[in-house]
Amino acid sequence: QVQLVESGGGLVQAGGSLRLSCAASGRTFGAMGWFRQAPGKEREFVSAIGWSGGSTYYADSVKGRFTISRDNAKNTVYLQMNSLKPEDTAVYYCAAKPPYSGSNYFEWRSYAYWGQGTQVTVSS
């Protein structure tokens, strides 16, 4: 059974930091990513990382502030979020693709597996 379990969300003041983790199990995964969804808004791409960790991708809104990484020995992907802003407030979702399933990292519909989400709230 495939499972993606996020952790690390919470409430933080603007300018603060959080580190999200996503523990994956049940099969081998290819690229993995983070998406977020704020109330009344569509789910949006945040960041993605290739299987080896050598390729990383970021939304312009988080570039320079967020860092994605993965530890394949632990089947875990991380999202280090620094200099958080109130507009980063959203439910953050971990997503994963099977291996060799294409290079569309930015479209949420291209990911086959999803976690339940973790709330990130940034107060001003």
Image: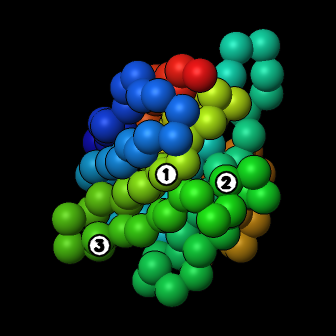
> Which callout, 3 or 2, points to the residue nearer the camera?
2
Write down the residue under mark 1: 82
Q: Residue at x 39, y 43 (%)?
A: 18
Query: Which disc is residue 52 wearing?
Result: none
Q: Are marks 2 and 1 in contact (CB under 8 Å)?
A: no
Quadrant occupied by the C terminus:
top right
Please name whichever residue, 16 or 51, is drawn nearer the observer in this view of the structure.
16
Residue 80, position in %: x, y? Answer: 43, 55
Query: Which disc is residue 72 wearing?
Result: 3
| Badge 3 amino acid | Asn
Q: Residue at x 42, y 44 (%)?
A: 17
Is residue 26 visible to the viewer in this orientation of the structure?
no
Please name whichever residue, 17 or 37, is drawn nearer the observer in this view of the structure.
17
Q: Tell which circle, 3 or 2, labels the residue nearer the N-terminal end.
A: 2
Please name whichever residue, 11 or 95, is drawn nearer the observer in this view of the structure.
11
Residue 77, position in %: x, y? Answer: 37, 59
Q: Tell which circle, 1 or 3, labels the residue nearer the N-terminal end.
A: 3
Query: Which disc is residue 62 wearing?
Result: 2
Q: Is residue 83 left or right of residue 36?
A: left
Most extreme residue toward the left is 74
| Badge 1 amino acid | Asn
Q: Is residue 82 left or right of residue 37?
A: left
Find numbered disc 1 in the image and state the secondary structure of the residue it sits on.
Answer: loop
Most extreme residue toward the top is 40
Residue 105, position in %: x, y? Answer: 70, 63
In space, the residues marked 3 and 2 are separated at their CA atoms by 24 Å
Mark 2, Cα crowd under 10 Å, few <14 / some 14-19 / many 20+, is some
Find numbered disc 3 in the image and state the secondary structure of the residue it sits on.
Answer: loop
In space, the residues marked 2 and 1 are separated at their CA atoms by 9 Å
Q: Residue at x 47, y 28 (%)?
A: 13
